[in-house]
Amino acid sequence: MLNLLRCLLLASPVASAVLPRAGSSQETSSDFSKRGVFGPIDTSSPSGVAGGQVTCAAPPVNSFFAGLKAPFPTNTWWAGYAATPGNAVVAGPFPYESALNNTGIQFGVSSSRQFDGTSVKQPTQMDWRASFSEHQGSFSNHKATAFDTQSVTVQYFQGSSTLTAYLVPGSPYMTFEYKGATPLLTSINGGIKSFNGNALSTGASSSATGTTFTVVDSTGTTYLIYSLSSISLVATAKSSGSGEIRASSPFTGVLRLVKLNDPSHKALLDQHYQVYPTTVGLDYSFTDTTSTLIFNWNTIGDGSQLLMLTWPHHRVALQSPNYPATSSLNYLTTKGWMYPILGNQWKLQNALSSIIWNPPRALDSSCKSSVIQGLQYEIGQLNPANAPVPGDFYYWGGTLAAVSRLALIADNLGRPDLVTPVITYLKTSFNYWFQASSSTLPAYETTWGGIVNKAGANNVNIDFGNGYYNDHHFHYGYFLHVAAVIGKFDSTWLSQHKSYINYFARDIINPSSSDPYFPVTRCRDWFAGHSWASGIANGAGSRDQESIGEAVNGYYGALLWASVALSQDYVNYAKMLVATEQQAAQIYWHLYPSQSQTARDNPYPEPAMRNLITMGNVEDWQSGAWLFWGSQRVEIASIQILPVTPINEAMYDTEWVNNVWSYTMPELVDPTIGDEWKNVIIAAYSNAHPQTAAAWSANITSWGSGNTYTNELYFIGTRPNPSGQPICGALPQNPYGNFKLQVASSGNFVTASSANTNLVASTSSSGSASVFNSAYVPNAGTLQLTSTNQFVTADSSGSYTISASRASASSWERFTIRQKIGAASGVYTIKASSNGKFITVGGDGSLVNNGANEAAGAGFKFVAS
């Protein structure tokens, strides 16, 4: 049954649905209400934010937004036009790359695609610069006259002469409107070789009058020039490296340039050049189970004849598309082949998940006791007096979000007694965001418009560039997750802090230009189909996103917040953002060796690329299986998976997690690689093989700052289980209680004392043996010498005898004790969590954690005492 929560435009179907264009008045909330587009979350000033107001050290280029008011987009494909110094090469409007220089708009399409073993790259290629003779070369004499969620309109001006460029992604043509200006097109990839079929030698010229022209540069690159009214052009081959095409007089009309990849493409281009897009309106509608994202292009000419280009993610979602043959027009880009489509409205449909707080199935009964035990332990470690004081945005947010999952799991398992201490802990830590005296604070940045880390507004190295608008959806998704969990269980806190928390929601999921303080859905590139993490740092050149998992989580956090604090409209909006980001993950980040090289929607035709199983970084000019900060396979895969939350089961598809499992296996069995990455791989694998994942999870002793033992096992235990077999079965545990340790091979017992804290198997007498208390830690335990109450510790080098010398236990005091393979029942190995190595016994009886594998570990009997 259709949900009536629809937001179709009530105005013209080609009206801009989100952002006002140049010359239009600022729309009000009532305007949006009438039109049906979601209104703003809030419109109040962020004056209450604890850090006050700041100004970014990299404000927009002074002249670029002349006549327009903040907030301005920071993560769009064209951010490099606006970010200082304003001349960065940007990847767009695809299939073109472009840059704004002092005299005009440079653009081109890369003719080189490279694969270096880890990345596909398409290096920048500038083919032409569009300008006009009257322009005197002042960089300040250009500006944006309008922008929307996908496109930007840029105007160059000199006196009454203007050149207006409608930069709309997906158009095969570059569109330039001249008014009283003499068009000047400059070749910058090579000199002009021929014009309209006439070969040109250096210094020679050729003229032509009409509406269709062909120009070939000295590299063989061909462009078609279309004019919507007759024009006279003169082409001059100035040298082997340059040339120009100049109109014979000032012109008022439209020129369209298009790169011709193949002569056979000219027929389609000739047929549709007279219809061009100027702006894009965004719209959406919902049923109970689907979202439909709608692109409406404003066009000059018959919109049904608008020729545009699609990427793979468009084609898998488009409803009733009108596709010409793929052979009739195509461009290979870093997102795969762009193929043609006709029409000025696209409807892209995605399935919406029903998941919000909990998985769609109950915890398997075989896992319940272990999960409860983990809950009790991990919640028992939470001391509000030691709740973290935020020192940054990213790590604080990820750590607290992982803790907040404990409250949701406890609630789901009917343990309200365990919920309260988690909420108390979260509130204590979150409270620092409201205090102006805190050392790390959010502040409102005024030049672009958004919430930033106050200290980072003038330092791009703080918080991964948060003050320069990097990674906001990563950071604030965690914030919103924590706040939503608190609000779910404490309505008073929610009421008190709702407006404040909304600052973070408005920063990343504001759906409306009626919010005067925040841009529309800051990080989302609606045409690219996913978000960009990069903001305006480094001149806002190449766009990139390194963690699709955290991008999804950004919108999942917003979904949780919308569920407790906002209306169903914003729940739907967040669900759509989650669904489309997950779709992008499976198309552009997940690599499938089984996918045909010639498949229409394969973004990476190179078989060797697909064999790398997962992208680490997707950028607008290259994509590769690498990270800025790590090179291990488990790292590259895990950052696309984490954090482990219920919403991601749709993203962990069976083929991909099976491939990831095999691809990372050499590192999964490598004891020198930490469990903080392995646990994430195991969790994702459980979506296809829960029993195997549960068995592997029993050997994990560290979950990093963004996960917990409880959440890991709860996720595994709530996976689809078609076999019906118990998921957890009899999970192995350490023997717990008071014991004397006896070396199985020699029969000697272990001793330690305050005088000699080292553990040494030095006595054959049980009466002389030391007693150790073995206590529970998830998947492991601690050993405490009862005579001194000191915990046994093992250094990470494995060079020294382990000793009972720590007053409190941390990760170096954890040991995994398991039945030794091939030994008699009750003979165990002991593995140190500090380095993943097994305890051995030296010739002098010293216990040292230096066994490289289980077979090298000594066997111990735990004799009850």
Image (cartoon, rainbow, N blue to C red):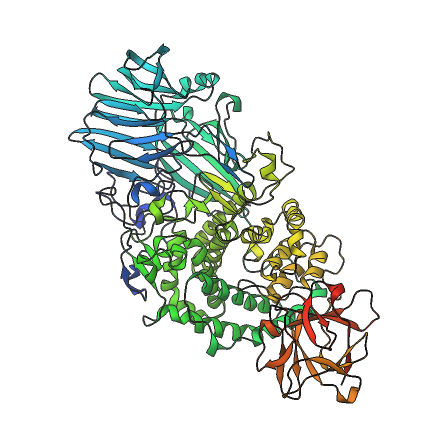
Who is closer to the viewer here, 392 or 800? 800
Residue 287 visible at all:
no
Question: Residue 87, relative to residue 851: is it above or below?
Answer: above
Residue 187 sits in quarter:
top left
Q: In the displayed image of the protein, which residue is found farthest to the right?
A: 824
Residue at 73%, 77% in the rendered image:
844
Q: In the displayed image of the protein, which residue is found farthest to the left?
A: 159
What count of labels does the image hold? 0
On the image, the x and y values in percent for residue 279 come to: 34, 35
Q: Is residue 407 left or right of residue 91?
A: right
On the image, the x and y values in percent for residue 527 come to: 43, 38
Q: Indicate the quadrant containing the N terminus: top left, top right, bottom left or bottom right.
A: top right
On the image, the x and y values in percent for residue 425 come to: 48, 74
Residue at 62%, 36% in the rendered image:
595
Q: In the displayed image of the protein, which residue is found farthest to the front?
A: 843
Q: Is residue 822 left or right of residue 543?
A: right
On the image, the x and y values in percent for residue 386 come to: 47, 76
Q: Indicate the quadrant containing the C terminus: top left, top right, bottom left or bottom right.
A: bottom right
Residue 453 sits in quarter:
bottom left
Q: Is residue 276 left or right of residue 360?
A: left
Q: Is residue 30 left or right of residue 401?
A: left
Who is closer to the viewer here, 332 or 327? 332
Residue 67 visible at all:
yes
